[in-house]
């Protein structure tokens, strides 16, 4: 059982299954074609399975790792029946997903020894970063925590406006400054205010630009240094938000951001409108970073804590409500 399994009740599973429908149908269709009319696992089946995984946006490197594990199991356990292949595949895929260490940001539960807990959110414009922050604030507030938002994306007035709308919608305070203000100053003020007001969680938005990796690195380093002046060791997590519907492009974004800063967690959005959910496997496996949240719909409750067992089961479930 994964760390988050206990958090997944019937409602969460139904939300996940409904949100994963497009990905599941595309994935199972590819696997179904591999096994159609085949009674045993042979070299042809394995080759076609490898091709099916790559075309499902699982990615070449992750596919090769999965296939290595599948082939090892087939040889070791003398599996020859294709009916057993799905189970082997599920277990191999699950093993590729990185587990989240400890209890930090675990299913809308915060650790007791870090208050306020500081979460720095990064990602390019358009991936659903601001919406993810708003949904996180909503979920943590519902869990009984005091939340504060920081609008450190000061390069776009629209970014500050959008985060302000979310703060009003959720009913949590926000720290902001005029467009063009120093992002690190906003981050500093946000954390200082949260400390003074005894907030439990601080969520800080940042600018989503990738045109100059060195500039991005310098800016994020400055923001983190400013936060650390108020609370040594903070930020406690750097959450990278990626748009799952962009497939391999999300991998490129992950590559840029992990090179620019120490990303510790992932949120993958917009999985409800795409058949490219296989990219979740590729990103987690290739960058060795745990997925903490996935977005599977537009409703405020459609941001779920990531449970890798539930995710893999949903990926292979023929029954949407199973």
Image (cartoon, rainbow, N blue to C red):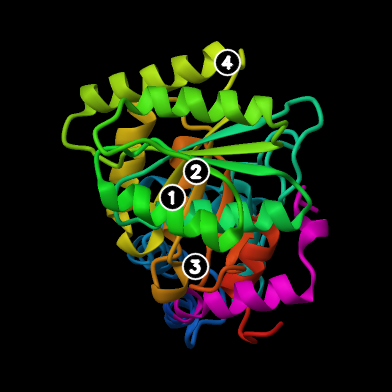
Give the Cα distance between marks 4 and 2.
Answer: 34 Å
Mark 4 neighbour class, 10 Å CA radius: few under 14, some 14 to 19, many 20 or more:
some
Residue occupied by mark 1: 282
Q: Can residue 305 be seen by looking at this rendering?
A: no
Residue 43 vs residue 118, the one in the foreground: 118
Mark 1 neighbour class, 10 Å CA radius: few under 14, some 14 to 19, many 20 or more:
many
Give the Cα distance between marks 4 and 3.
Answer: 60 Å
Q: Quadrant of residue 216?
A: top left
Q: Say what secondary structure mark 2 lies in.
A: helix
Residue 75 position, x and y percent, is: 61, 53
Give the Cα distance between marks 1 and 2.
Answer: 5 Å
x 38%, y 56%: residue: 162
x 73%, y 26%: residue: 114
Side of 143 relative to 252 (left or right): right
- Asked whether 314 falls inside the magenta stretch, the response is no
Quadrant for the C terminus in the image: bottom right
x 23%, y 28%: residue: 213
Q: Of the two numbered discs 2 and 3 on the same chain, state the one appearing first in sequence.
A: 3
Is 192 placed above or below 69 here? above
Give the Cα distance between marks 2 and 3.
Answer: 26 Å
Residue 60 vs residue 303, the one in the foreground: 303
CB under 8 Å between discs 1 and 2: yes
**Which secondary structure is most common in the magenta stretch?**
helix
Q: Say what secondary structure mark 4 lies in.
A: helix
Residue 201 position, x and y percent, is: 65, 38
Q: Of the two numbered discs 3 and 1 on the same chain, state the one appearing first in sequence.
A: 3
Q: Say what secondary structure mark 1 lies in.
A: helix
Q: Say what secondary structure mark 3 lies in.
A: loop
Q: Identify the mark at residue 42; answer none if there is no mark.
A: 3
The span shown in magenta is 1-25
Q: Identify the mark at residue 285; answer none if there is no mark.
A: 2
């Amino acid at each position: 059982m994964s760390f988050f399994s206990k958090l997944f009740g019937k409602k969460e599973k139904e939300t996940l299954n409904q949100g994963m429908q497009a990905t599941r149908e595309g994935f199972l269709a590819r696997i179904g074609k591999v096994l159609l009319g085949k009674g045993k696992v042979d070299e042809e089946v394995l080759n076609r399975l490898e091709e099916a995984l790559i075309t499902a946006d699982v990615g070449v490197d992750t596919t090769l790792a999965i296939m290595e594990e599948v082939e090892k199991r087939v040889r070791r356990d003398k599996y020859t029946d294709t009916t057993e292949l799905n189970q082997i595949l599920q277990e191999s895929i699950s093993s590729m997903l990185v587990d989240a260490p400890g209890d930090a940001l675990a299913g809308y539960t915060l650790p007791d020894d870090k208050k306020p807990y500081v979460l720095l959110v990064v990602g390019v414009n358009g991936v659903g970063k601001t919406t993810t922050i708003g949904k996180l604030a909503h979920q943590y507030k519902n869990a009984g925590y005091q939340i504060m938002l920081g609008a450190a994306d000061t390069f776009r007035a629209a970014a500050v406006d959008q985060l302000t709308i979310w703060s009003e919608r959720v009913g949590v305070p926000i720290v902001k400054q005029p467009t063009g203000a120093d992002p690190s100053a906003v981050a500093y003020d946000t954390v200082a205010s949260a400390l003074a007001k005894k907030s439990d969680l601080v969520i800080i938005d940042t600018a989503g630009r990738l045109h100059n990796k060195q500039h991005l690195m310098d800016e994020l380093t400055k923001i983190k240094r400013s936060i650390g002046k108020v609370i040594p060791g903070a930020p406690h997590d750097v959450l990278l938000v990626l748009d799952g519907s962009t497939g391999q492009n999300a991998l490129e974004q992950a590559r840029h951001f992990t090179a620019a800063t120490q990303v510790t967690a992932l949120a993958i959005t917009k999985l409800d409108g795409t058949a490219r959910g296989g990219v979740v496997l590729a990103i987690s496996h290739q960058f060795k970073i745990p997925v903490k949240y996935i977005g599977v719909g537009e409703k405020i409750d459609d941001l779920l804590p990531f449970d890798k067992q539930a995710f893999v089961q949903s990926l292979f479930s023929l029954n949407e409500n199973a």
